Image (tube, grey):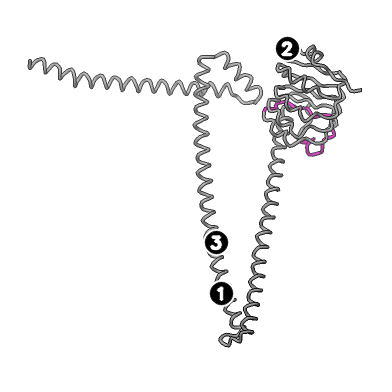
Amino acid sequence: MTIKLKLKDVKDKLKEDTLDLSLCDLEEVPVREIASLRKATNVNLSTNLLVSLPVTFVTLKQIVKLDLSRNMLVELPENFGEMTQLKHLDLYANKISRLPLSLSELKNLRWLDLKENPLTEAVASVAGPCSNMRECQACARNIVTYLSNVKLVIEEERLRRLNNVTGDADKEMPSTKKENKKKKKKKDVEKEKMNGNKTDSPTQSEGCLQDNNDSVRLMGSSSNNASTRKSYKSTGTRLCRSFTCVIVWFFVISSLLTVTMVMLSWRYEQQTDTFLQNAQTLSGLPLKNYHRQTTDYLQRIIKIATVQIKSIIDIANDFYRTQFESGTSKGEKEL
């Protein structure tokens, strides 16, 4: 018998931002009831009887931490990658053998456990053991990257097959044109025979037609080569311009973000220090050291700019005194 929880029962299991629906013998996920609880960002559905997740499960976009361990899930929905806010995903001890390609879109995923699942050898080797926090973080990062690469390879293969199909169609079109030309030649020769034309023999006319066709082919091939060279040149120019624009915008945006972070850190020093500490823990990069060096460098630039501006102001004041005050004193003497 399928157990269905009512909204009141689901609300009773909500404590702050954590919704604990574990050990409820659930065979279906109460998506509508969970969706009504916008505060439920940490959802625990472990140790139930779930075999699959509904397609509407991805509407629960508020979920940041999701525990689906110790169920009987065979696979995840193909649109599971739409849960872009997801950072923590526990799929321990299920029956999942394949992962949807959309999982590569979970760019915020920082923790993933796939142990005790009948995964393929390739996916299992990429996922790793996940016996501690560091390994589970690496599992999330490696799986997202692996699925992104697989998705890219599949897309390239699809484009290659599409190009092959269009290429075969282009090859078939010239062959049909040649057959039509041959038929037309035969009809022209038969007409000349019936009309008793004695000016040119059929062999001569065929030879002339053949020469004309050869010249047309040569002209067409040369024009095709020229157009191909032009297209390659224009394509290379566009790629260089696009690459240059991307680099310029990257440096501009990076500079603006750096200056903004430094200015905010001066005003909100404690909050910035906490943010950098958390980011450094997650990424493993010495972000606090980078921030300190950037702040020192920016302060040095500000000091230099202040000295330069002050010297310019002093020069302007001296010029004003020498020009205008001397002129004023001369005018007073003349009066």
Query: Between residues 154 and 30, which one lies in front from this camera angle?
Result: 30
SS at circle 3: helix
Determine which quarter of the picture holds residue 51: top right
Q: Which residues are magenta?
A: 108-125
Label 3 amino acid? Asn
Q: Residue furthest left?
A: 334
Q: Reply yes or no: does residue 124 show up in magenta.
A: yes
Location of mark 3 (residue): 225
Residue 16: image tag: 2
Asked if labels 2 and 3 touch by Cβ distance under 8 angstroms, the answer is no
Residue 22: image tag: none
Kindly report the distance in space between the C-alpha atoms of the residues bearing marks 3 and 2.
70 Å
Kindly report the distance in space between the C-alpha atoms of the residues bearing marks 1 and 2.
86 Å
Determine which quarter of the picture holds residue 299: top left
Location of mark 1 (residue): 212
Which quadrant, please, contains the N terminus?
A: top right
User: Which residue is pictured at 47% across the width and 24% down the height?
Assistant: 297
Work out whether mark 1 precedes mark 2 in sequence or the reverse, and give the earlier one. 2
Q: Reply yes or no: does residue 91 show up in magenta.
A: no
Between disc 1 and disc 2, the foreground one is 1
